[in-house]
Image (cartoon, rainbow, N blue to C red):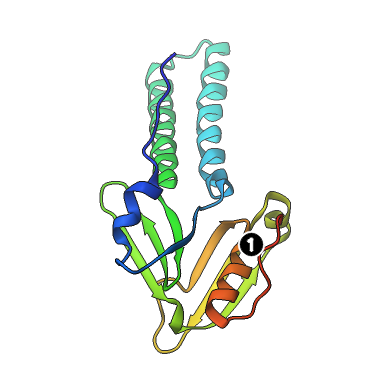
Amino acid sequence: MVRLQLPDPALRDTKYLASQERLVMMVRLHWAIMLPILAQTLGAVLLALVVNIALAMQDVETSLVTTLLWYFALFMILRMLWKIADWHFDHLMITDKRLLKVSGIVFRKVQTMPLSKITDLTYNRDPLGRLLGYGEFVVESAGQDQALSKISFLPRPDRLYLTLVDMTFGGGPSPAGGD
């Protein structure tokens, strides 16, 4: 069996770091970010299947309708695969100097915020996030609105929060072993 091995983003994206910058932590967004696209794809496939079965049971000429529905389901499956690949290549990097969010497959986008500009860090976790293990950061900085003002679906948010607080404001407790 042939196994598809995708390149490791950690090795590829260290080129965005300055020569004296040290990578402290890198995380991919939590898999729960994919739940809506998975539900939409499943819904499209089930819709095509149910309509196909219902029309076949009524002995109705269904070639155009079912063909269009199956093409729509195929489109949704391809869309889901693209979103999964996009999720694989997107990640958040925390260095000793900056916060970086790298995204995109074909066109790479690198958003940065110097840690010295962070004035406030809010950490939110809704009930589903607590259950599945993700959270959201709201980062406020001195000056204008920043590109990284809200970062959702962060895995291990407790550890990330403690790391960022310690690096930004100093004196924070060391990260705990679990969430």
Rendered residue at 33%/63% (across/down): 17
Percent x, y of residue 5:
40, 30
Percent x, y of residue 9:
38, 47
Is the residue 115 above or below the residue 73 in the image? below
Rendered residue at 40%/38% (across/down): 79
Whether residue 104 is visible, yes or no, is: no
Q: Nearer the viewer, residue 133 or 12?
A: 12
19 horizontally vs 78: left or right: left
Quadrant in which residue 70 is drawn:
top left
Quadrant in which residue 6 is drawn:
top left
Whether residue 31 is visible, yes or no, is: yes
Percent x, y of residue 108:
29, 54
Q: Residues within 10 Å of mark 1 (few under 14, many from 20)?
A: some
Is the residue 20 above or below the residue 52 in the image? below
Q: Amino acid at mark 1?
A: Arg
Q: How many marks?
A: 1
Is the residue 55 above or below the residue 4 in the image? above
48 horizontally vs 20: left or right: right
Looking at the rendering, in which quadrant would you find the N terminus? Answer: top left
Residue found at the very far front of the displayed protein? 20
Looking at the rendering, in which quadrant would you find the C terminus? Answer: bottom right
Rendered residue at 57%/19% (across/down): 54
Q: Nearer the viewer, residue 64 or 100?
A: 100
Quadrant in which residue 96 is drawn:
bottom left
Q: Nearer the viewer, residue 99 or 143?
A: 99
Q: Which residue matches tag 1?
A: 159
Percent x, y of residue 175:
66, 64
